[in-house]
Image: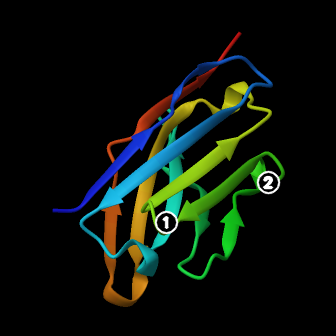
């Protein structure tokens, strides 16, 4: 059974930092592209960042220079370090595991991030 379990969300003031974690089980983690997506109320789910099996990263323009995605293939965990948070970063953040060659896609349950003073 595949599980992606996110943690680390919460309430933070503008300019603050949070680190999200996503622990994966039931997959060969090192083979998957891991990503973070976010969805604000009434909006579509958008890519925030992803990291390929080979460690190549990609970021949405809105988070470049502020967010960093990383992975630990021993702990089967992907991280999203979020710095200089802004109110517009408020959303539910979802972890994603994708293996494009097999057309496989898994999602976590999501973790709420709220940036407010």
Q: Locate the N terminus by quadrant.
A: bottom left
The residue that appears at 56% across and 63% down in the rendered structure is 71
The residue indicated by pointer 2 is 64
Tag count: 2
Q: Position of residue 83 (x, y in %)?
A: 76, 37
The alpha-carbon separation of the residues under discs 2 and 1 comes to: 17 Å
The residue indicated by pointer 1 is 34
Nearer to me, 98 or 53: 53
Above or below for 72 versus 67 = below
Q: Is residue 69 visible?
A: yes
Element type where label 2 sits in the image: loop
Q: Quadrant of residue 30?
A: bottom left
Q: Is residue 41 visible?
A: no
Of tags 2 and 1, which is closer to the observer?
A: 1
Q: Earlier in the sequence, mark 2 or mark 1?
A: 1
Near mark 2 (Cα within 10 A), the count class, few <14, some 14-19 or many ≥20, is few
């Amino acid at each position: 059974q595949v599980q992606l379990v996110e943690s680390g969300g919460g309430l933070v003031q503008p300019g603050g930092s949070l680190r999200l974690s996503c622990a994966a089980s039931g997959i060969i983690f090192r083979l998957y592209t891991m990503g973070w997506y976010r969805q604000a109320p009434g909006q579509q789910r958008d890519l925030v960042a992803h990291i390929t099996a080979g460690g190549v990263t990609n970021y949405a323009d809105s988070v470049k220079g502020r967010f960093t995605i990383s992975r630990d293939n021993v702990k089967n965990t992907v991280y999203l370090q979020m710095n200089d948070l802004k109110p517009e970063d408020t959303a539910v953040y979802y972890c994603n595991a994708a293996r494009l060659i097999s057309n496989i896609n898994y999602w976590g349950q999501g973790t709420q991030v709220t940036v407010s003073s």
